[in-house]
Image: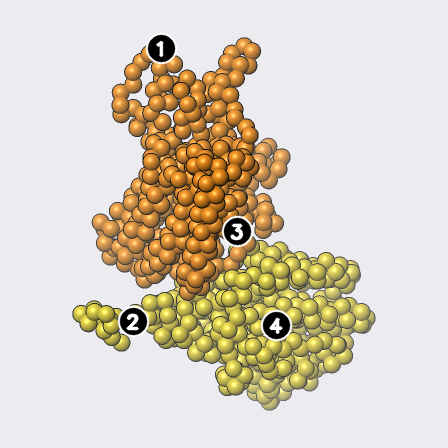
Chain colours: A yellow, B orange
């Protein structure tokens, strides 16, 4: 759109297109934003996804039920455990298998540890996006300790491939509970340290308050879930609403804030770190003895039928729709991923913002691209 | 510089009269060497400080292994020399679509400004074989302070040229941001510096230091303009950080937003010149802060002798050396403060930056000027004239 410069009619002002990404330091991998800019101000924003498409859903159709598990690791590499979990849960639902209680507890422990790891990663990158370099290292320092726990359990630090249909691939190491509790004791006071780095800082406060406001109506309309939804005042959490595994037996709060801005989304995640620690302490206490796996045939055949299950990943409501036609491979395996919805709504929030706000808002949604593109 | 240099050569050679151009060439060489070596050291120091703040050690692998084993502060000494060599040897790429003239001119321009600003900076003084204390600077200009402020503003031209000529939208945005930012912060900065100007009644940086040494109201400790012009010092420091595009005011090259801002398309030596100029400018603002607010090369109530007798030989120019040591110690203290700020704060947003500069810093610098005028008037009436 061309318009004339008020002071001098001979001059015209024109909007320009800025192609941010897919190669850009802060588009979290390969998100491409086609921005129509009026100087520093964003007029329109069009997100383009698909640069990381690996056809995971199609690949799943050509693999046996067990072989799909390592593929789900690649769904959202920041929280492989919950991606594993949602798929395993769908298969178990269809085959009518119940994992032994110890396995259920181990799964919850892993999910919550992964939530901590994922939120710490988010904390670091989010701070980096608003221009503070130091919190990044703090987040990563403590994430390492969580990854050490994972490594001692399943041998992997990023892509775990740990959950199995009917349980988990191996039992926890003997001293796992002690080490986990030692980590929690050491780490919980450090949450305060993370907050000290950002909370009281006027620059950070001004950059995040009243920026990227997401109304609860809009959030629901676009299918926003997880911490982002809870920051908009909706106390929705799959762990509470459709409890799975042993969550009904555990006590935890669901932090909610009503501001719906970037700062609220940041605060929600900081609170969730504390709640995860609380859940982990209870799990360590209640962890039952017994088998950790109800072995299934390697090439298992599922009865005909379809199912949809979902659970609460660190990013939100992740779902798996599984259709079986009585064969040893899924007929259709569809994942409902939270980041896809978040990118969808994100383009409406950045309108009339400045370039730095795009980064703050984008980062505050905790968008992970491999999950979006699949 | 000239009288001392001539005196020095005469002492050394026994009466050789140096040609008039020799001091200039020697100063140019000294300043160039200083910029390069000091920037290398500062980059190393910055990475170490940053590492310390972030609970890591910074570069440790280049350099003698034995030093690295000793402590984190002795490791990685060769990192920046290695990086410099790497930048020198890298391919110089001029993208096809750029405006070649502007693209090639910008790094030279920015470096020229960084070089020229050293001229009036006084680093020490000596009274060795001189009638009175002589200020050691390339040239102690009568309008030194004005000159410094004017020259540092030249950087805008270079950055705007770089942003425009690069034919890249990120560069353009970065260049425009830099232009707006430097222009807006120039004004509170100048007003903040006017406080000391009024107090000293002089624009020469050398005079400013000597006045501070003499003290205010006859009290030497009050003399550092940091005390009477405290608000001015704070405003100047903030503006100085903004002028040199250091975080948290690094909007022009905000990595997370504009990739690398105005220097996005630059590679190898051209990029290194921007980088070098940035670190040089950072040190220059610290030097100006030292000279204007921290009493330069002097310490209250301390006048080093012009030469010391060590028994077996006598060390001439001792006051010059002691002054330089004091001056650089102070300047590096300010550098450390800037590094601390850099690695602690998030980045400002451009519109907040403008609000902060125009609505907060500018009024504050006026208040400071007012305070300084009152103090200068008291000094004038009750203590008789400017101390200098």
At a point 70% along the width and 60% down the height, the residue shown is A189
Which residue is nearer to you in this view: A58 or A362?
A362
Q: Are circles 3 and 2 on residues that touch, CB within 8 Å?
A: no
Crowding around mark 4 (Cα neighbors within 10 Å: few <14, some 14 to 19, many 20+) is many
Residue that numbered label 4 is attached to: A268
Residue that numbered label 1 is attached to: B14
| Measured Cα–Cα span from mark 1 to mark 2 | 71 Å
Residue that numbered label 3 is attached to: B341
| Measured Cα–Cα span from mark 2 to mark 4 | 37 Å
* Lower sequence index among marks 2 and 4: 2
Which residue is nearer to you in this view: A56 or A199?
A199
Q: Quadrant of residue A34?
A: bottom left
* Lower sequence index among marks 3 and 1: 1
Element class at badge 3: helix
Q: Is residue A256 above or below residue B32?
A: below
The subunit carrying tag 3 is B
Between marks 4 and 1 in the image, the one whose residue lies nearer the viewer: 1
The subunit carrying tag 1 is B
Q: Which mark is residue A15?
A: 2
């Amino acid at each position: 759109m061309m318009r004339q410069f008020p002071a001098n009619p001979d001059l015209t002002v024109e909007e320009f297109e800025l192609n941010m990404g897919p190669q850009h330091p802060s588009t979290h991998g390969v998100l491409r934003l086609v921005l129509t800019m009026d100087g520093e101000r964003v007029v329109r924003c069009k997100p383009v996804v698909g640069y990381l498409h690996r056809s995971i859903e199609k690949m799943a159709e050509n693999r046996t039920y067990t072989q799909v598990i390592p593929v789900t690791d690649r769904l959202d590499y920041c929280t492989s455990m919950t991606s594993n979990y949602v798929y395993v849960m769908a298969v178990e639902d269809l085959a009518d298998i119940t994992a032994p209680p110890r396995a259920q507890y181990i799964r919850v422990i892993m999910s919550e540890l992964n939530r901590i790891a994922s939120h710490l990663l988010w904390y670091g990158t989010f701070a980096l996006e608003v221009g503070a370099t130091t919190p990044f290292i703090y987040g990563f320092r403590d994430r390492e300790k969580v990854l050490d726990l994972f490594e001692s359990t399943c041998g992997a630090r990023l892509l775990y491939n740990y959950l199995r249909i009917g349980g988990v691939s191996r039992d926890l190491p003997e001293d796992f509970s002690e080490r986990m509790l030692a980590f929690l004791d050491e780490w919980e006071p450090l949450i305060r340290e993370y907050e000290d780095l950002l909370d009281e800082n006027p620059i950070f406060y001004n950059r995040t308050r009243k920026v990227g406001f997401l109304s609860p109506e809009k959030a629901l309309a676009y299918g926003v879930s997880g911490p982002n939804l809870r920051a908009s005042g909706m106390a929705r959490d799959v762990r509470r609403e459709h409890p799975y595994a042993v969550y009904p037996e555990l006590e935890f709060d669901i932090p909610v804030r009503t501001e719906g801005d970037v700062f609220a989304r940041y605060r929600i995640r900081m609170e969730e770190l504390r709640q995860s620690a609380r859940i982990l302490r209870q799990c360590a206490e209640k962890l039952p003895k017994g088998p950790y796996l109800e072995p299934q045939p390697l090439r298992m055949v599922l009865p005909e039928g379809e199912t949809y299950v979902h659970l609460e990943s660190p990013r939100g409501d992740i779902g798996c729709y599984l259709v079986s036609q009585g064969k040893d491979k899924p007929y259709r395996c569809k994942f409902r991923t939270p980041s896809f919805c978040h990118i969808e709504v994100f383009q409406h929030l950045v309108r009339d913002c400045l370039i730095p706000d795009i980064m703050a808002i984008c980062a505050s949604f905790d968008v992970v691209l491999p999950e979006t593109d699949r | 510089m000239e009288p001392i240099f001539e005196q020095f050569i005469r002492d050394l050679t026994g009466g050789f009269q140096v040609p008039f151009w020799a001091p200039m060439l020697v100063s140019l060489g000294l300043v160039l060497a200083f910029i390069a070596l000091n920037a290398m050291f500062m980059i190393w120091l910055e990475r170490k400080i940053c590492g310390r703040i972030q609970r890591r050690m910074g570069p440790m692998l280049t350099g003698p292994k034995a030093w690295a084993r000793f402590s984190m502060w002795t490791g990685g000494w060769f990192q920046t020399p290695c990086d410099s060599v790497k930048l020198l040897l890298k391919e110089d790429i001029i993208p096809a679509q750029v405006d070649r003239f502007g693209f090639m001119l910008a790094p030279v321009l920015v470096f020229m400004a960084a070089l020229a600003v050293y001229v009036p900076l006084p680093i020490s003084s000596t009274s060795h074989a001189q009638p009175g204390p002589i200020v050691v600077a390339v040239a102690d200009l009568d309008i030194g302070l004005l000159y410094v402020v004017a020259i540092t503003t030249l950087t805008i031209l270079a950055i705007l040229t770089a942003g425009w000529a690069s034919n890249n939208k990120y560069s353009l945005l970065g260049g425009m941001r830099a232009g707006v930012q430097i222009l807006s912060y120039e004004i509170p900065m100048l007003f903040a510096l006017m406080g000391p100007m009024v107090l000293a009644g002089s624009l020469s940086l050398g005079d400013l230091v000597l006045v501070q040494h003499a003290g205010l109201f006859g009290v030497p400790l009050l003399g550092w303009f940091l005390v009477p012009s405290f608000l001015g010092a704070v405003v100047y420091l903030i503006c100085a950080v903004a002028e040199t595009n250091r975080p948290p005011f690094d909007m022009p090259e905000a990595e997370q937003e504009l990739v690398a801002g105005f220097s996005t398309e630059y590679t190898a030596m051209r990029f290194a010149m921007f980088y070098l100029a940035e670190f040089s400018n950072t040190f220059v603002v610290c030097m100006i802060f030292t000279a204007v607010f921290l009493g330069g090369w002097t310490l209250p109530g301390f006048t080093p002798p012009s030469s010391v007798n060590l028994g077996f030989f006598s060390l001439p120019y001792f006051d010059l050396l002691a002054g330089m040591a004091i001056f650089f110690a102070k300047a590096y203290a300010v550098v450390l403060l800037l590094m601390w700020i850099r690695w602690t704060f998030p980045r400002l947003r451009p519109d907040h930056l403008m609000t902060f500069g125009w609505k907060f810093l500018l009024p504050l610098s006026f208040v400071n000027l007012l305070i300084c005028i009152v103090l200068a008037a008291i000094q004038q009436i009750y203590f008789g004239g400017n101390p200098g």
